Amino acid sequence: MTITGFEINSPSPYFVLSKHDTIPTVLTVSNSREVENDIKVFTTHKTHSFSSITSLKAGEEVIPVPESLINQHIDLSKVDVIKTGDLSIHSIKNLAKKLNQSETQLVSNGTILLSDNFDALVNDLGKYINILVLDVTKLDVCFSSIEDTILFSRGLTADKGIENILLTNFAKEDKFTNILYQASKDKVLTFQNNTKFESISISTLTASISANIANDYPLAFAIYGALEFTQNATLLSQDDMSSSLNLIHNVYVPLSDMVNDDCFTAHDLVTKPQLIEDKSITHQFMEYLNEHPYVEKHWNDYVNHDFVKQVAESRLDLQQFKFYIEQDYNYLADYARFHCISAAKAPDLIDIEKELYVLDRIRESMDCHKNRLRDYFGVTDDDHMDKVERSDALNEYARYMGDISRRGNYRELMMALCPCMIGYCKAVSFYVGKTDPEPGSIYRDWTNFYSSIPIEESIGKGAYFLNHVAQDCPKEELYILIKIYGDVCGLEAKFWDSPLERTFT
């Protein structure tokens, strides 16, 4: 018999810092199905949860819980926020008595209630409700405009004393608008999303608002965050969204972080993934990627882009060129940050050294951009780049790269970084020796910079990075890497679209 011992690691230093943090608590009062969903939502929002189940619900069968038991589980001394859903008239009256002696905030999902119960909710609990969430498609009122929803909300708050009302699912022109009416300010905020919220989504939305308020977020911000969380949970669901949402899309598996801890010692317990064995992938990954059906169009749009052609032929409008330089400078600043993160995630020293080389090239490119603005456009303000308004294309690109750098592993981040390293030189290479921009012009300056970089050497470095990634890639991760690479090639093409779409007077 063999006995092997393993030492359990202590909490990570960062987790220890939060040991004495106060964790907010939310109480949900509703039927068993909604309570189950609410507890999941509260957990993803880092709040403790209490529950008081008003009925057991399975399919169409509903078994009411005795009111005495419901009442026993409503202890307002332990909670920061109450979230209500499916309530009986009796439960509503009991809760009103408790709230009369408490300052606990109340968030109510009014959509789930029958008409009589809804009347009791707004009559008996109205003055305690911090925010009431209603689905306009479930109301016995026809709204033809946002102004109609405001009149409805204004009337309900005035009559019942409700502080705030959020109306969801107001549809117009394939967009869904959520309207927040704040009675104390007589103020309206609207939030647009591209997803209709079903019943389970409304419950999730209300629970998310409750948790955000418990975490001390201001009301409008709490609602914004809840709407995005609910929309994402809906869009990322694999099952029928009317019954199940992906509520854990932003939750990490604890063990994945434990294994990456520098002090982790139980390596013998870790199952090693099965790596890609096909040498046509692991030794020619760049060729494999660029010919892959998902990537090919994005890659071709990128390296054959009309922006590069116009520069090489000295046809690009100078103001469009200036706009590109300003945007690209800010992009390179972002790109440098992502390479720094890549170096921090790199598995070995040689990868770190190659990142340092890339950072030197980025610094050189940024200096060249500053010089171009000075020499060709007369920009001498040292703070000019800080004042540049970032384009939508730049922000979309930065968002994608930033998300990969924060959440992704080293392989995924390398796949996001490589298209820029490889594609620029590849795109310029098509025009080297075939066009002749005027000497001393900005067009010659730009093409000379990229054509002066040894094309084969640059592409070779990119190929090394990609092959290195492929040789260390688990089989099940291959499609993710392909998609990231293809997505970023598409973002590169959009980035070059941006200056061409600009008009200047």
Image: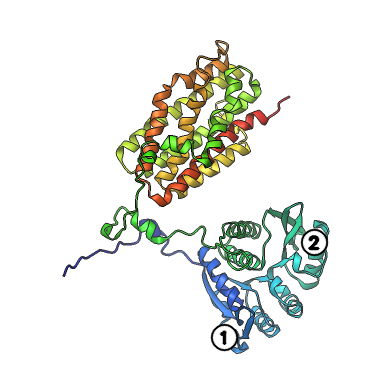
State which mark lies toward you, 1 or 2: 2
Q: Residue at x 68, y 85 (%)?
A: 90
Q: Is mark 1 on a helix, strand or loop?
A: helix
13 or 331, which is in the foreground?
Answer: 331
> Is 482 situated above or below 375?
below
Based on the displayed image, in which of its 4 quarters is residue 310 positioned?
top right
Q: Earlier in the sequence, mark 1 or mark 2?
A: 1
Q: Residue at x 59, y 22 (%)?
A: 309
Based on the displayed image, in which of its 4 quarters is residue 212 positioned?
bottom right
Please tell me the numbered disc located at residue 149.
Answer: 2
> Is 234 situated above or below 120?
above
> Is 133 situated above or below 369?
below
Expressed as whole percent of the image width and height from the top left, the position of residue 392 reads 63, 39
Type of the residue with mark 2: Thr
Type of the residue with mark 1: Gln
Expressed as whole percent of the image width and height from the top left, the position of residue 234 reads 60, 60
For this view, does 417 lie left or right of residue 377? left
371 or 483, which is in the foreground?
Answer: 483
**Label 1 sits on residue:** 72
* Gap between marks 1 and 2 measured at Cα: 38 Å
Expressed as whole percent of the image width and height from the top left, the position of residue 72 reads 57, 85
Circle 2 crowding by C-alpha within 10 Å: few under 14, some 14–19, many from 20: many
If the image is split into quadrants, where does the N terminus sit?
bottom left
Please tell me the numbered disc located at residue 342.
Answer: none
197 or 376, which is in the foreground?
Answer: 197
Q: Is mark 2 on a helix, strand or loop?
A: helix
